[in-house]
Amino acid sequence: MIDSVKTILDELNFTLNSDDYTLVEFFKENGYCVIPKSDLVSENIDELRKIVDSLIKKESWRGGWEGKEEYMKYKKVFQPGTNRLGNLFNKDKVFRKLLCEENILKIAYAILGDDVKIGALDMREPKKGAGSQDLHMDWIPKKTVNEKAQNIVAFIFLDEANENNGPMRVVPKTHTMTGWIDENLKDKSSHPDEIFFNIAESSIVLMNANLWHSGTVNVSGNRRRVLFLDIRRREIPQLLNQRIYLDETTQGKLTDIEKYLLGVGENDTIFEDRVHTAGNVYRKQFKTNDFVKNH
């Protein structure tokens, strides 16, 4: 019976080793860690790229609309200058393979505990001359410095990222901060401690969703397709409510492991929220729509 992440790890014969624990300790201290190469991603990268490009062409300006339906009513592009895709678990079986990526599951288990679920798989690609974002957070701020991590994001790189094609940047150790960035940083365009990821295809960056981070401008126009997987403690509503956004056909094809990880099993709590994002909380608190340009 699949009733915890531990039972999934046992079923798949995934065991944390000394290298994994080294990554976990680095993650706890710095708010992120890097998996230099995922065998699962590498084995499927051609198919992942092919399906991503097909969806970009098919969905056009509507790409990434799931959870942002208010933009679609006015035929507004959600994030100009980027290709976006959302709700990917519902769009091809190759994306569902990533639910059982070994490195992600092991580190999520070590950081978040035995009771987690996955709430979305999206894609973002900056176009030439675009992609720059203010530093931001992907989760609601901590109330206390010692508050446990609630949300991890796994960035899965389908292309090499470097200084020319809009690399991801982070500000290490900011995951321990309390309050929104606005309450701690006047100029969100840069930070003296920020670092940029020059990273190979098939790599994964695992990040505490409270860490300050952003995309940067793609000056070359070279491809930089990145999938991002949202992982949360099970008692928290998902980024996208998978009971709503996975159609019946897809749900009928899921394995027991996939049902558990996506929170759509018979015994899973049913949440009413269609979408649960830090951005929604931010906009209510600050009475602004500025946050949307970063997501």
Image (cartoon, grey):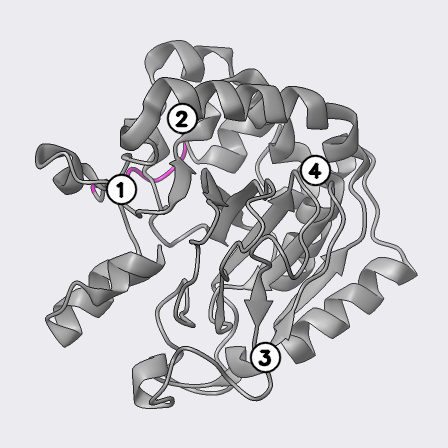
Task: Give, as a three-letter code, the residue at label 2.
Answer: Glu
For the residue labelled by badge 1, is the local secondary structure a helix, a strand or a loop? loop
Task: Give the mark toward the camera: 2 or 1.
Answer: 1
Image coordinates for residue 201, horizontal then vertical, percent: 73, 42
**Measuring 84% from the left and 46% from the top, which residue is drawn there?**
15
Mark toward the start of the polypeptide (3 vs 4) = 4
Residue 116 visible, this angle: yes
- Between the C-alphas of marks 2 and 3, the distance is 44 Å
Q: In the image, is residue 261 above or below residue 295?
A: above
Name the quadrant of the N terminus. top right
Instruction: Judge from the rendering whether residue 116 lies leftward or rightward of residue 45; answer left or right.
Output: left
Q: In the image, is residue 96 above or below residue 209?
A: above
**Measuring 59% from the left and 62% from the top, which residue is drawn there?**
207
Residue 91 visible, this angle: no
Task: Give the mark toward the camera: 3 or 4.
Answer: 3
Please give the range of residues in magenta: 267-272
Residue located beneath label 4 in the image: 101
Residue located beneath label 2 in the image: 266
Task: Give, as a three-letter code, the residue at label 1.
Answer: Phe
